[in-house]
Amino acid sequence: MTAALDVKGLTTRFDTRGGSVTAVNNVSFSVDKGRILGIVGESGSGKSVTGFSILGLIDEPGKVVGGSVLIEGTDLRALSPDDMRGMRGRKVSMVFQDPMMTLNPVLRVGDQMAMAVRVHRPMSKPKALEEARRALEIVGIPSPAERLKAYPHQLSGGMRQRVAIAIALLHSPAVIIADEPTTALDVSIQGQILAEVRRLADQTGTAIVWITHDLAVVSSLADDICVMYAGRIVERGTAEQVISAPRHPYTQGLLDSVPAQHEPGKPLPQIPGSTPQLSRLPSGCPFRPRCPRATELCATEPPVDDRDGQIVLCHHPLERP
Amino acid sequence: MFGYLIGRLAQAVVVVFVMSIIVFVGVYAIGNPIDVMIDPGATAEIRENLIRQYGLDQPLWQQYFTFIANVAQGDLGRSMVYNTSVTGLVFSRFPATVELVLVSVFIATIIGIPAGLWAGYRPNSIGAKLIMALSVLGFSVPTFWIGMLLIMAFAVELGWLPSGGRGEVAQFLWFKTSLATSDGWAHVIMPALNLSLFKMGLLIRLTRAGMVEAMGAEYVRFARAQGLPDRQIVFSHVLRNISIPVVTVFGLELGSTLAFAVVTETVFNWPGVGKLIIDSIMQLDRPVMVAYLVLVVMLFVIINLVVDLIYARLDPRVRLKGGS
Amino acid sequence: MADSATTTGGTLAVPAAPPAETRAMRLRNFWSDYRQSWVALAALAVIVALAIGAFGAPFLVPQDPYDLANLDWMDAFLTPGEVGTGGYVHLLGTDNAGRDMLSAILYGLRTSFVIGLSAGALALAIGITVGLTAAYFGGRIEALLMRVVDLQLSMPAILLALVLVAVLGQGVFQIILALVVAQYAYFARTTHGAATVERRKDYIEAARSTPLPTRRVLFSHLLPNVLPPLIVVATVQVASAISLEATLSFLGVGLPLTEPSLGTLISNGFKYIHAGRYWLSIYPGIFLMFTVVAINLVGDQVRTILDPRNSR
């Protein structure tokens, strides 16, 4: 079976006055139909840029310089700009972080949704509005017909994010990329949306890439997890593998600093140091300066270590019995 | 909405009233108009009579109340120079100015907005840089000098267009306008272009700034992620957002176009109210000055009100409330 | 738009906090930013050259155009390059009274500069005072002052200046006064806007709670923080003062021909435009245009540098 999304060697570079920065460095992963992949990383790790690179939405001075992005077997990077546009929203769509900003404040929700319907499937506006209404119903918005007439500012944040998800679902795409879609929302609403997304993935068979900085979120939601650090995927495996038996020291550090898994009363462990600047990365393993296991060997490029499909990029991976 | 309108109108009346006092007192502080109007050889008796006839012997506050009482009856006084009713005088000149302003606003819009959109859509292209350079010229080079250059080029050197004056007028619906004749258009096009340049420069900058900002906005990125083509993003999403600040500033600037018509009308000898006010200032024709200024203040207040109403229509987030 | 930055390149390279900057360093940084645009550099060079020409005019040009004894009717309407009775070349020709145009232009430019700069400086001083007073005291004083300012801003400057000149009469002093009254409101609005933003910040509250005199708080704490936007407004306003003065003089309500500014010269030359004597109005106009455009371009570049959104 072809994967819904297969990314191989994706590399994105920003060429600025201050020099060239590789924001996404040789990133590979794949997601099957109906599965949810979580991409975890700190801000600046390149996880969002990865999402935008997949859709070909990188603005100047950034540029996707290498790799392939296969959606149900079609390589997006080989398509003409116009064909690529035809794929966006239809085969692969995206949900953004801040629902306050993603909807146009001066257009009615229905008008925005109808536009998104008709761009890929020419039809009359009433028909498009009917499609939109159905999509709102699917994501669990009450009295959807009225919501269509509303302006975005008349809806709550959670409601707006549901609208954004409904828009992403309009054409039943093979893949949805969700870029921290619950970060800006209250915890209770976050939970509702996560449950909704899980249900949608199971029912519609849409593959979902869930980008977040919150390990707790992905551990409950995702089937597979990629951990990103300084533009690279440093660990990849099933959620089970990565959460219960992490092999990369960085993943271990992230897990240790999750409050929920921590013994009360003791100070919360932290990863020493701070997120590196991509323009000034050390040679070899970028995590080296902050890593408790680092040796001189780490100044050279870390090797890929594969054990039962759990892949790490490390000279000294944690060994589990 | 209705309460809002009432509040705004009450406010407008107060503003016009206060401005009328300031203008009246200010203008009446200018030297003695009688000396300008009468023959220096006239007897003291004639002089006295004239002063009494215009009510100039009364205290200022009394003159003001007489003025207000007359205004309430639609009488703005008599011109001391033309010796006709000011109301008639101003309204006979007004159509020419309105004509000029409308054509110039039209020119500014049809050139300024597309140019600004393009400059904002491709901010690093050579075309965009050229447009921006021209816009700087448009609103920094003094209007009167550009007008002069236009006359020199198109009237004196090339002889294509008349150098000044208003052309033939013809009946259009219920009023006479020079826009109904080709001779009228030949006369209006150059002054209108001249008057439009400042506004055009401003519009280009505004539209460009709005466009640049909007193109970086999340909702545009989201629209792209939905697969909308750029053309549709610009025309359906961005234009609506840009139109809010553009309409606001544009409306407010409409008043200043009216004021700058003073300059253009002088350069092109255009028989509008602007030319009238300059002549009146030179000849100390007080009633005309006061009438013109009060009229302009009223227009300003009306324009501001209309702009606010349009603003509320364009931006669903704005809800009009009474008062401020 | 901050959000799109965080999703693309914005947070990728967060620079380390810059070391405390000295004033000299700030100035040097400003200059190195300024140099980035060759247009802005050229504009600055034009301003310097024009200023030298204007203020050095008595030493540079052959004739004092203000001195009627220097004028000879025989020299009237000489075309550019002709030699007049004085025995020297009139590079830009002469006017209807036999005035050497180049001399008249440089003297006129001096008048324009003096008027633009003094009107700008005065308007700046008054505007800052009004704006800071309003922002500092708040309440009724603020409401009243800013109401007046807003009312004035809704009126075009040209109209206000026109009325004032009509009231005050002709002359350099009267023109400056009219320009100041017409323009102070821009400074007041800018100062007030920036100051109300600053006012909410803690350091002003802190300064107010110490027994410092009001004046000290206003000028030593608020002022430095509202200065950047004011600098930008000031350049624009000086250019607009020069252009406004020229316009008023052109309309015949500005300066008389006996003490000509550029506007007066253009106005005078305009009468002869149909006779093909273009040099009477074109040359002073070119000088005026270069002055105003150059100042605006410098202001544009300063704005770009000071705009916090452009800082790297």
Image (cartoon, rainbow, N blue to C red):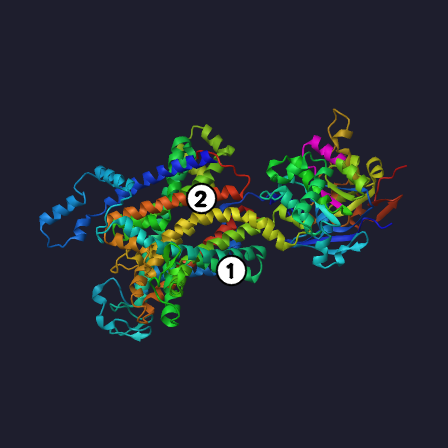
Q: Is residue A17 visible?
A: no
Dot placed on the residue nearer the N-terminal end, 2 or 1:
1
Residue A76: which quarter of the image?
A: bottom right
Do pointers 2 and 1 mark residues of a single chain?
yes
Residue at figure coordinates x 39%, y 31% from the top left = C140
Q: Is residue C13 visible?
A: yes
Q: Position of residue A106 (x, y in %)?
A: 58, 43
Check disc 2 and report the residue beneath it: B306
Q: Position of residue C261 (x, y in %)?
A: 31, 59
Q: Nearer the viewer, mark 2 or mark 1?
A: 2
Q: Position of residue B225 (x, y in %)?
A: 69, 49
Check disc 1 and report the residue beneath it: B131
Q: Amino acid at mark 1?
A: Ile
Which chain is disc 1 placed on? B
Camera-side residue: B32 or B166? B166
Q: Position of residue C162 (x, y in %)?
A: 31, 51
Q: Which residues fall within the magenta stretch?
A: A176-195
